[in-house]
Image (tube, rainbow, N blue to C red):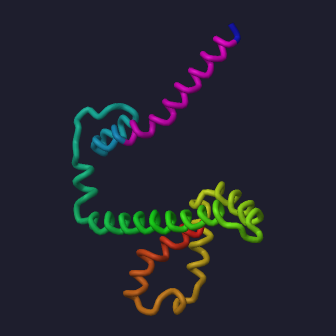
Amino acid sequence: MKRKRGGIVSQLLMILLVVVIIFPLYFMTANSFKTHEEYVNNMAGLPQTFTVQNFVEAFRGKPFGQWFMNSLILTVAAVFITGIIALLAGYAFAKMRFKGKKVLFNMIVPLMSVPPVVMIIPQFRIIKILPPKRRCSTRAACRRKSAKWWTILPQRSN
């Protein structure tokens, strides 16, 4: 009897958790097809009339192609750099013997529990206090660097 009651309670908690996780997705999708007036009057319900005007306005006049390419470059570079570093480090820890291997390993493993998102603000502050000469040589170089390496490399150091 006790086991059955515990099973029911855990099932109810799981159902509640699924609802809590799925509701924002429903809310975002349902409201994206509403007009502004309909959204103000009925935030949680389904739209009375489906409209795609919100999407048309969002994409009009915006350089989404360039934004997508920037995201693609950042993602591919970050995955590649992370993969290479992890591959080399994993091989070194698995196959090589060197002084301080256990100490280094015991220092790295706890750092893996810190999510990289936590480091974004400190890294931004560090980059912000660098003198302009150290950041980049020209305005065009500054744009190139900030678009690519200044955002890729600090995240890979985590």
Give residue 26's position: percent from left, percent from top: 39, 36
Give residue 152's position: percent from left, percent from top: 48, 71
Give residue 34's position: percent from left, percent from top: 29, 41
Whether residue 58 is situated above or below residue 88 in the rendered picture: above
The mark total stands at 0
Q: Is residue 9 shown in magenta?
A: yes
In the depicted view, which residue is nearer to us: 44 or 113? 113
Q: Which of the 4 image quarters holds residue 97?
A: bottom right
What type of secondary structure mainly makes up the magenta span? helix
In the image, is 65 to the left or to the right of 98?
Answer: left
Q: Start and end of the magenta stretch?
A: 3-28
In the image, is 33 to the left or to the right of 143?
Answer: left
Give residue 73's position: percent from left, percent from top: 37, 68
Q: Which of the 4 image quarters holds residue 9?
A: top right
Q: Which of the 4 image quarters holds residue 61?
A: bottom left
Q: Report the residue at 46% width, 76% height from top.
A: 149
Q: Report the residue at 73% width, 66% height from top.
A: 101
Q: Is residue 64 shown in magenta?
A: no
